[in-house]
Amino acid sequence: MGNPIGDLSWTFYSECEVPSDITETFIDGERAVAAYKTVRDVAVFTNKRLIVRDAQGLTGKKIEVYSLPYDSINMYSTENAGRMFDLNSEVQLFTRSGTIKINLNKKVDVRKFDRLLAEAIL
């Protein structure tokens, strides 16, 4: 059987502020831990889940929101960027529904990101 969630892949470019429209979706006791700028929007790590807001279409008015509870992540891997030609670090989240790939721009510290995942999942 293939990957039921398709080929989910995002690139995180740099840390950023948490948008207020995302905090409005938090449940009781949920708080933001870190946020990262994506191509057109933002990914927010909370103490309970990963939320990715993905603007779509030419105008960006169509919004898709992904919510990934940490307890659905079975395993993850991180790979730091190499030298000259390998500019991005890579992260893979292996979930019950399939694999999610996250590329980290050189502005994002892969080891800090690794600790963030470990604290959320373990």
Image (tube, rainbow, N blue to C red):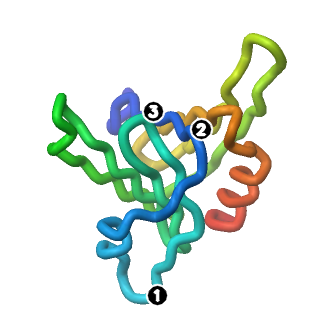
Find residue 105 and report its horizontal and vertical position in percent: 63, 33
SS for dot 2: strand
Which residue is located at x 48 percent, y 59 percent? Answer: 44
Q: Is residue 113 above or below residue 20?
A: above
SS for dot 1: loop
Which residue is located at x 74 percent, y 11 percent? Answer: 85
Mark 2 crowd level (few <14, some 14–19, many ≥20, 10 Å Cα):
some
Mark 3 crowd level (few <14, some 14–19, many ≥20, 10 Å Cα):
few
Q: Are marks 1 and 3 in contact (CB under 8 Å)?
A: no
Observer-nearest residue: 43 or 94? 43
Residue depth check, mark 2 versus mark 3: number of the one nearer the observer: 3
Find residue 6 and report its horizontal and vertical position in percent: 34, 31
On residue 29, the disc is 1
Residue that label 3 marks? 9
Q: Mark 1 vs mark 3: which is more N-terminal? A: 3
Residue that label 2 marks? 92
> How far apart are the two marked residues, 2 and 1, measured between alpha carbons?
27 Å
